[in-house]
Image (cartoon, coloured by chain):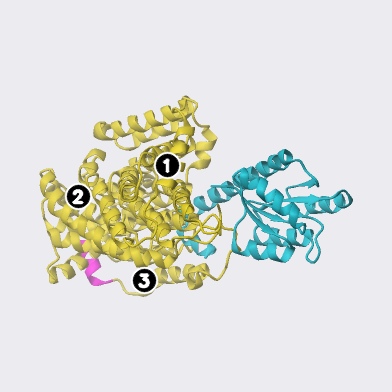
Chain colours: A cyan, B yellow
């Protein structure tokens, strides 16, 4: 299956351009132009990686990140930041973001980080699945824990 | 991809209240064992059958009333074991340990006999089977087998039929739980690949019926495979242990004669049933989804050294089980699964130890202990007489009627508790019932009927780990929503449960039992053990 990306930034032109470039590389891209609509889409769909602008009006990137980590802790987040907000991006790393990139970023760097983020997600999901299967193999009743 | 959600503590309701069930089970034991009077019929039985004398000779009972009380204690363990197995009030391995603990502390068996239930041929066989599973799964051989099987198919009906028949046969030899764990995400991926071609405005239009068809076909097919060989599950080995107790042991190959023909037929029945039930599914071409499996198969490349050794080991052990004869037993070849991977460096010894489900092993050994307690105290014989009298009254007291009755009960029970627990509790009662009926082929016939039916845990999600695993891993990768609900098992599994039983009755009891037949003198040999009850 294609990697599913949620692209969150208030700069419409930037989002449209980046989404197009990612789609030509077979990524499934969903766009959001502010924090609230990003969180709405997150409730409805699963994403492998969220590319998230740090500086947005309304709900900030850090607040979106915190909510993502509560709702979908396995989803990896890449913070996008301008030069003036590097400290915020570092704060984001402390809050659980996978990595950050400075804008404007080279597409090759972005693709590399997306690939690494996906890899970590797959490994974590695999460990969780393995633990779940081990538990269910000896305790089918534990399936009620996940209902 | 996994669905990310917060676990709910209240979802299991009253069933999750483990303390309640712990106490309930204990109360059942205490009431039956210490409060209710000992039935006179039980006292008379163990006196007449010399069971009390045997227990006195073993120094585990002072006199007849004391021996009868010991039998009553074992009767009290039955509802406790049922409750604990069904509700998992204690981890199942611990429930298994509880059996020898009771045997020791209440002196229900001579000490050396208690240990034997944990170190005989059956427990060693089970240990080897679990170890074999660790190695086969560890080298990824099950993945190659599954992708080989499905990768060449295309269309709609063919993949479903191939899936069901292949899983039912594989499930007879390779851990069905591991196959479920591997194949559930594969089926989810096949589903996503198939519906991705239906995208509207970039979003997938889901076909929930297709998702249910794929996942439920998988787990039902794996379930029915359990009849095929003793390696399919501990429940089959437990039954073989009970036959050995009556000096009528069945070999691995003999079980396959009766069980293996049933596996693909039941698998085909699952496929046809599911295709009929889901005949109106919207997506009728799985080829796009199967393409991903084809590509996975290509990426795997040639079989690695580890896979070759694991495959060779499986074949060697299987040949030894079938042709090794009674001298090797089942345990002898099975233990090779612990040695070969380490010697040939395809698995690390500590990883094998870590991968063996000791929970399952303790449960199986505990089940064997419970069976021994039921037999040696006369509790099983007493229950067998009661049930047989009841079944005789309604004309189901022997032969086909008895097999149908027993398999129906066992098939029902296995949906509520573990298959091994079901066999452990019903086996010691069913075997004497078969012997007392006097029909040629007993007690193999009733034992097979009881054990086969424990593979039909289709209609409750907790009936078997296969159901729970398929439910847990079956999620839509884009939304994280579950593909099947617990109610789907009742909705689609109940009728299949009936169909599975009917196929077993017709093909198994009325055809295979008649065509293959049974060795001469089985029931006579078993009867002599039952009547003398010699230690």
Q: Choose between B45 and A58: the one closer to the eye.
A: A58
Subunit ID for the residue under disc 2: B
Asked if the stretch drawn in magenta spans residue B405, the answer is no
Magenta residues span B39-48
Q: Residue at x 42, y 49 (%)?
A: B180
Mark 1 or 3: in front is 1
The circle drawn on residue B410 is none
Q: Are marks 1 and 3 on the same chain?
A: yes
Whether B114 is drawn above or below B35: the answer is above
Q: Which residue is mark 3?
A: B32
Q: Residue B508, how many percent across, how many down?
A: 18, 52
- Please indicate whether residue B80 sits to the left or right of residue A131 in the image: left
Name the secondary structure under disc 2.
Answer: helix
Subunit ID for the residue under disc 3: B
Name the secondary structure under disc 3.
Answer: helix
Asked if the stretch drawn in magenta spans residue B41, the answer is yes
Q: Residue B263, how many percent across, how many down?
A: 26, 48
Query: In whole angstroms, how far apart are the C-alphas of marks 2 and 1?
Result: 25 Å
Disc 2 to disc 1: CB gap under 8 Å:
no
Query: In whole angstroms, how far apart are the C-alphas of marks 1 and 3?
Result: 36 Å
Sequence-first tag of 1 and 3:
3
Q: Residue at x 41, y 70 (%)?
A: B30
The circle drawn on residue B444 is 2
Q: Which residue is mark 1?
A: B130
Label 1, residues with CA under 10 Å away: few <14, some 14-19, many ≥20: many
């Amino acid at each position: 299956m294609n990697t599913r990306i949620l692209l969150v930034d208030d700069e419409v032109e930037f989002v449209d351009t980046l989404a197009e470039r990612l789609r030509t590389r077979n990524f499934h891209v969903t766009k959001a132009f502010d924090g609230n609509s990003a969180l709405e889409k997150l409730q409805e769909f699963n994403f492998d990686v969220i590319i998230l602008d740090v500086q947005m009006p309304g709900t900030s990137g850090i607040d979106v990140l915190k909510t993502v980590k509560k709702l979908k802790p396995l989803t990896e987040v890449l913070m996008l930041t301008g030069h003036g907000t590097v400290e915020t991006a570092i704060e984001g790393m402390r809050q659980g973001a996978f990595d950050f990139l400075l804008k404007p970023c080279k597409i090759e760097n972005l693709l590399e980080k997306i690939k690494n983020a996906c890899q970590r997600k797959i490994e974590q999901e695999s460990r969780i699945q393995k633990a779940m299967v081990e538990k269910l193999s000896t305790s089918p009743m534990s399936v009620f824990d996940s209902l | 991809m996994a669905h990310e959600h917060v676990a709910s503590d209240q979802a299991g309701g009253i069933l999750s209240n483990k303390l309640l069930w712990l106490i309930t089970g204990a109360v059942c034991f205490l009431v039956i064992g210490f409060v209710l009077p000992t039935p006179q019929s039980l006292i008379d039985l163990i006196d007449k059958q010399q069971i009390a004398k045997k227990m006195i000779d073993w120094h585990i009972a002072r006199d007849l009333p004391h021996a009868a009380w010991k039998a009553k204690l074992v009767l009290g363990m039955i509802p406790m074991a049922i409750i604990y197995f069904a509700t998992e009030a204690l981890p199942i391995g611990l429930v298994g340990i509880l059996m020898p603990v009771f045997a020791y502390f209440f002196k229900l068996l001579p000490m050396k006999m208690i240990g034997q239930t944990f170190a005989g041929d059956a427990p060693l066989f089970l240990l080897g089977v679990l170890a074999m599973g660790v190695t086969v799964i560890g080298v990824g051989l099950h993945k190659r087998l599954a992708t080989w099987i499905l990768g060449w198919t295309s269309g709609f009906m063919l993949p479903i039929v191939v899936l069901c028949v292949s899983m039912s046969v594989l499930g007879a030899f390779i851990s069905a739980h591991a196959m479920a764990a591997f194949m559930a995400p594969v089926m989810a991926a096949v589903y996503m690949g198939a519906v991705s071609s239906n995208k509207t405005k970039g979003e997938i239009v889901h076909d929930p019926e297709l998702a249910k068809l794929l996942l439920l076909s998988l787990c039902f097919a794996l379930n029915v495979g359990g009849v095929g060989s003793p390696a399919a599950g501990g429940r089959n080995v437990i039954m073989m242990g009970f036959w050995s107790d009556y000096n009528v042991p069945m070999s691995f190959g003999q079980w396959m004669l009766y069980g293996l023909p049933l596996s693909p037929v039941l698998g085909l029945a699952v496929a046809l049933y599911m295709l009929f039930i889901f005949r109106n599914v919207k997506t009728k071409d799985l080829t796009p989804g199967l393409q991903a499996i084809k590509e996975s198969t290509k990426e795997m490349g040639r079989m690695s050294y580890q896979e070759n050794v694991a495959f060779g080991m499986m074949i060697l052990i299987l040949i030894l089980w079938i042709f090794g004869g009674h001298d090797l037993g089942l345990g002898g070849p099975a233990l090779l699964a612990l040695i070969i991977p380490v010697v040939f460096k395809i698995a690390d010894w500590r990883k094998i130890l870590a991968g063996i489900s000791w929970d399952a092993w303790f449960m199986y050994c505990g089940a064997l202990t419970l069976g021994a307690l039921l037999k040696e105290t006369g509790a099983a014989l007493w229950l067998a007489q009661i049930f047989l009298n009841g079944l005789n009254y309604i004309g189901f007291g022997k032969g086909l009627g008895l097999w149908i009755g027993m398999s129906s009960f066992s098939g029902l029970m296995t949906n509520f508790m573990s298959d091994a627990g079901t066999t452990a509790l019903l086996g010691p009662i069913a075997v004497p019932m078969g012997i007392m009926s006097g029909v040629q082929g007993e007690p193999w016939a009733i034992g097979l009927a009881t054990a086969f039916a424990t593979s039909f845990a289709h209609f409750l999600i907790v009936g078997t780990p296969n159901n729970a695993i398929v439910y847990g891993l079956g999620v839509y990768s884009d939304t994280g929503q579950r593909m099947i609900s617990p109610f789907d098992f009742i909705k689609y599994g109940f009728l299949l449960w009936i169909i599975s039983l009917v196929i077993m009755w017709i093909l198994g009891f009325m055809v295979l039992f008649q065509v293959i037949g049974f060795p001469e003198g089985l029931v006579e040999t078993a009867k002599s053990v039952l009547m003398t009850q010699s230690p």
